[in-house]
Amino acid sequence: MRLTKGALVAVLAGGLTATAAAAKMTSAEPVASGTGSSAVTAAQRTADPVAVKVAEARTAVVDVAADAVAVAHTAQSVGKATDVDGDDLSKLAKAADKLEDLVEKAKSIEAPAPVSSKDDSTDGTTPQTEPTPTDDGLTTSPSAAPSAPAVDGPLTSAAETPDMPATESVDAGAEAAEIDGLDELVVPEVAGPEDTTTAELRAAVAKIVTLSTAVEDSAQEAAEAAEKKAAAAKAAAQRAAWKKSLLGYANGQIPSSALCDLSFDTSAQLRCDAAEDIEKLNTAYRKAFGTDLSVTDSYRSYAGQVACRITKGYLCATPGTSNHGTGIALDLGGGIQTFGTVQHQWMVEHAAEYGWVHPGWAEPGSSKPEAWHWEYTG
């Protein structure tokens, strides 16, 4: 049954009264009887197991709290390194300071001293107490005195006391272990009576876990964003280098080692950035049609340009001027080579998304309509 705050105070007051009465009984004069000491000691000891359990609970939470402080400091370092929002780090710092203060407060509380009767003699003899006359004139020994009334239930409990809010055990598991120790940080469950300081420690540790987890999540997102940004910058630098890499070569005089093969047609070669984007375009094309792009011509050497001019005449550029000679042009088949087909229309609609275009001079009605010819402009 849950006790109201008033009822809990009454129970605590009754327990204290009983304890005071038991303590008063031990101050009686010693007598020859040997039965009084054990009775008084038993009365005194009725509250000691509770005090011991309270101290043990506090110690257990203090140990976890010390780990939580270390986790908070690590979280702050991780947060600063990944540019986590300053307000979040400030909240975590304040929570860590509060927890450290609570830990010091808890450590300053003395543990319950071992029980001993203040009337115990130092010479090893058992002190006795005189019989006490009763209202009817009879005498009774202290062993017959009523023991202190037992309190029903624990004196204090985080789950029962209004001014000591209950806190659930903290599951500090995280998706990532960026902050060392966070996923192992678990507060022992409430297993018995505990004091206000212990309950405050539980709440403070729980707050550290919540704030540290939020910092970890933000740090992870920031790190991933920074990684993507760095990768994008690296890719951009690489693409810029690829574009410049062929500038020293004359049209049609580029060595094979300076070009990149296509995975879906190893006989075809292009400038590396053009090859990278045609790979992406091919993936989209394959999803649409279930087959790869059909390449009929790619990089064309100077000798190849001469041969093309001889066989196809004006349809081939003057040797040394063809876009094929710089590794940025493709001739495609598989339906793309014909205006009005589904495949050609798909290319018209999607190729530009990957840096490939059908040049105006090759459009229908031009002097050299070439449905098959596509150039890279990325």
Image: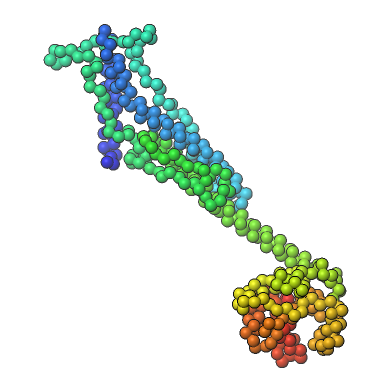
In which image quadrant can residue 164 be found? top left
Q: Quadrant of the N terminus?
A: top left
Please, is residue 372 above or below residue 37 in the view? Answer: below
In which image quadrant can residue 155 be found? top left
Please, is residue 21 above or below residue 188 in the view? Answer: above
Q: Position of residue 366 (x, y in %)?
A: 74, 90
Q: Residue at x 66, y 80 (%)?
A: 347
Please, is residue 61 above or below residue 238 in the view? Answer: above
Using the image as rendered, state which of residue 119 and residue 42 is in the foreground: 42
In which image quadrant can residue 221 be found? bottom right
Using the image as rendered, state which of residue 369 and residue 207 is in the foreground: 369
Q: How many marks?
A: 0
Q: Position of residue 153 (x, y in %)?
A: 30, 34
Q: Residue at x 43, y 44 (%)?
A: 169
As drawn, the residue found furthest toward the left would be: 136
Q: Residue at x 30, y 21 (%)?
A: 42
Q: Position of residue 73 (x, y in %)?
A: 56, 42
Q: Position of residue 252 (x, y in %)?
A: 84, 76
Horizontal side, residue 330 vs residue 217: left or right: right
Tell me how the rendering is colored. Answer: rainbow
